[in-house]
Image: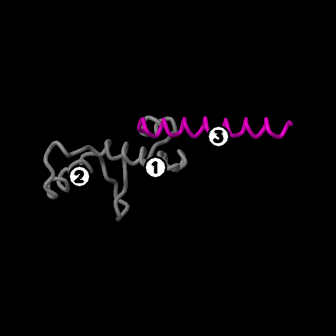
Amino acid sequence: MLCTDESAGSLHRGPIRNRLRSLLKLEGRPATDRFSPRALRVACATHHYERGVDLVAIRQLVGHWTVSSTMRYARPSATFIEDAYRCAVTTTLRELTAEGDSSV
């Protein structure tokens, strides 16, 4: 991952990881609560995906070249998947019922 800071200088993985570790330590978080920059990217991608943000936009936010890379980062919860399935089934049944009513 290669990011730029406010002065358009390059940031590499090491400094990002060190800065994140320092901030979490400064906040007083126990070591078990700490996470990596990659975990932060996974959380960001998943959060946006579950809220309906377009995958191309998420791809740009997390700095991937391809949407397929982004899909490995977006890890929707079981609840999200169940809700999406339930919504799809409900919509399909509603459409089928409407078609049946209009043909009479």
Please tell me which residue is depicted at 52% across the width and 49% down the height of the picture.
52
Please tell me which residue is depicted at 31% across the width and 53% down the height of the picture.
11
Amino acid at dot 3: Thr
Amino acid at dot 2: Leu
Please tell me which residue is depicted at 44% across the width and 47% down the height of the picture.
63
Percent x, y for residue 56? 54, 46
On screen, 8 above or below 99?
below
Dot placed on the residue nearer the N-terminal end, 2 or 3: 2
Please tell me which residue is depicted at 46% across the width and 43% down the height of the picture.
64
Residue 30 among magenta residues: no
Query: Of the numbered discs in the image, which one, if any, rests on residue 91?
Result: 3
Q: Which residues are magenta?
A: 77-104
Find the distance from the CA under tag 3 to the CA under tag 1.
Answer: 23 Å
Label 3 close to label 1 by CB (< 8 Å): no
Dot placed on the residue nearer the N-terminal end, 3 or 1: 1
Find the distance from the CA under tag 1 to the CA under tag 2.
Answer: 21 Å
Q: Is residue 13 found left or right of 74 in the rendered image?
A: left
Residue 79 among magenta residues: yes
Residue bearing the label numbered 1: 48
* Quarter containing the C terminus: top right
On screen, 16 above or below 7?
above
Percent x, y for residue 97? 73, 37
Percent x, y for residue 18? 20, 50
Residue at the far bottom: name it.
7
- Tag 3: Cα neighbours inside 10 Å, few (<14), some, or many (≥20)? few
Q: Nearer the viewer, residue 11 or 64?
A: 64
- Tag 1: Cα neighbours inside 10 Å, few (<14), some, or many (≥20)? some
- Tag 2: Cα neighbours inside 10 Å, few (<14), some, or many (≥20)? some
Residue bearing the label numbered 2: 20
